[in-house]
Image (cartoon, rainbow, N blue to C red):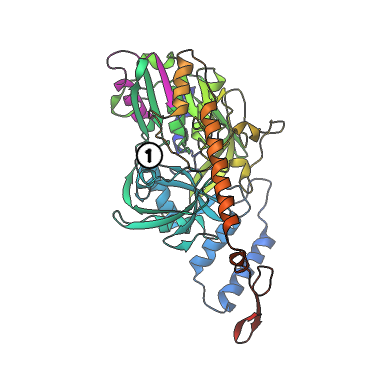
Amino acid sequence: MSTRKNRSLSWILTGFLGGVLVSLGISAVAQKGEPLPLKALQQFANVYGAIKSSYVEPVPDQTLIDDAIKGLFADLDPHSVYLDEEAYKQMQDITRGGFGGLGIEIGTQDGMPKVIAPIEDTPAARAGILTGDLITGIDGEPTKGMSLNDAVKKMRGEPGTPIDLTIRRAGSSKPLKFHIVREMIKTRSVRGKMLDHDIAYVRISQFQDRTTSDMVRMLSSLSKKQAPKGLVLDLRNDPGGLLDGAIGVASAFLEPGKLVVSTKGRIPSSNEEFYARPLDGSHGVEDGGQLPAWTRTVPMVVLVNVGSASASEIVAGALQDYKRARIIGNRTFGKGSVQSVLQLDKDTGIKLTTARYYTPSGRSIQNTGVEPDYVVDDSAAGNLFRMQREVDLRHHLENQPGAQGADDQADGDFVQGEIKMFEFGGADDWQLRQAVNALQGRPVQKSDPVQVKQARAEARDAGADAAAGEARKPAQAEKKTLNDAGDGVERYRVTPEGLIRIP
């Protein structure tokens, strides 16, 4: 039963990253009972012809077609997009795990690109780019109003070439400047190590074609001497990826045949159930890898945060529903929709939201995200990562009727002033320390009261110093900031000769 269902999932896409091609069962003709709007299509053809023949400058046919297709997606949910030739190639490169650039996943906010997550061990991560950073300038060019595709094009480039980013970061009073040299990004989605007290630590940064195989090999390598006494699965800042990777990862910790996730949409091919499968050479594990027996019984914690989305939420939600693992961290992003990619020709396609997904208990986490069993801040002094969630995105899909809204107050305090970043899995990783506490039966702390108090005091002192500095400025300096109009507004009149300032 589960094998047949799982066989089709490798062609379905759930993450921000995009993936491989699928057949949606969608044809050029309208669905049965819904005839094509021929009158409206004729109107479109008339407009197309008018622009083609009469616009002041000639517009290539392909440009008109591309722009028309993009317009169809303008009011759909934020994850449905048209993939032109360049975007389509980028999608394939990302999923295969290699591309040239900086190593960041980006979204958009206030008309500017925003960092969803820096990819580990890439130029962006090493330079100190953080989740939630707003990119306000690229090589001196403002990004306000720049399309996301254009921003991506500017940030990608040949390895060895430099780029300058201007960043606006919450808690920082001034723009931050970063000079970064591009590299060929070969993403490694699975990392791991043994911690003290025989606790295994495995981090998945995104779900790719090889994630399941790489994780099985990692789990095997961590238990060569003896089986671990506990396991921490780290999904923080993992923006998602391939559904097949999510099912494979969940299968490592659930008994074969257990429901992992179901999808429901308008077309029959969107209504599916996906089950945990055996993990060996014949079930999605390359190179004949064999899953260790201890993985389905070892005490387990899953770490999540606001940057955990889509495929990450599928795994966390399934393990939480079966009480297989305790979830620690912050409420996740809340992307509970499935995207499928339909190839239009050999170089272009569309990424279309075709279904919502549901955890084994029937929960939809669209907009709400996965609520941790233990809410723990990003750091001992408070939360670091400020970013929009799914519910904040324009045209987001609504949740199922009756679903409870998320409580934003539960996000807790954010660190004020300078942010001191840490390494996931490192010695100063506060959430990881709390995960180890949970596995060892010790109390789990949301934050360190002493460090929170100290951070608040430092923020107050910094604010007081800034206010005192402003107060010490001469009154004349304040007057110089005003123009002749007296209200901070410069006025101009439009004339045949151009713009003339009005005194």
Identify residue type, mark 1: Glu
Q: Which residues are magenta?
A: 212-233
Q: Total of numbered circles in the picture?
A: 1
Q: Quadrant of residue 469?
A: bottom right
- Asked whether, in this view, residue 42 is left or right of residue 459, the answer is right
Instruction: Classify residue 264 as left or right of residue 136.
Output: right
Q: Is 300 covered by the magenta stretch?
A: no
For the point 42% across and 14% down, the residue is 298
Q: Which residue is mark 1?
A: 120
Q: Relative to residue 500, is residue 119 depicted above or below? A: above
Counting from the top left corner in percent of width and height, residue 380 is at 49, 29
The answer to whether one can see residue 30 in this image is: yes
Q: Nearer the viewer, residue 401 or 6?
A: 401
Q: Bin the neighbour count of mark 1 within 10 Å (Cα to Cα): few under 14, some 14-19, many 20 and up.
A: some
Along the horizontal axis of the image, is 469 left or right of 293? right
Q: Tell which of 115 and 260 is nearer to you.
A: 115
Is 207 placed above or below 122 here?
above
Query: Above or below — where is 199 with respect to 469?
Result: above
Please, which residue is most extreme toward the bottom here?
A: 497
Confirm whether residue 25 shows in the render: no
Q: Please name the residue shown 51% across and 39% down the image.
A: 385
Could you tell me residue 287's position as x and y percent?
A: 28, 28
- The quadrant of the rendering that contains the C terminus is bottom right
Identity of the residue drawn at 59% across and 59% down: 71
Q: Secondary structure at mark 1?
A: loop
Which quadrant of the structure image shows residue 370?
Answer: top right
Residue at x 61% of width, y 36% of height: 366
- Magenta region includes residue 221: yes
Percent from the top left, x then y, of residue 46? 63, 70
Give above or below for 201 relative to 399: above
* Front one among 430 and 238: 430
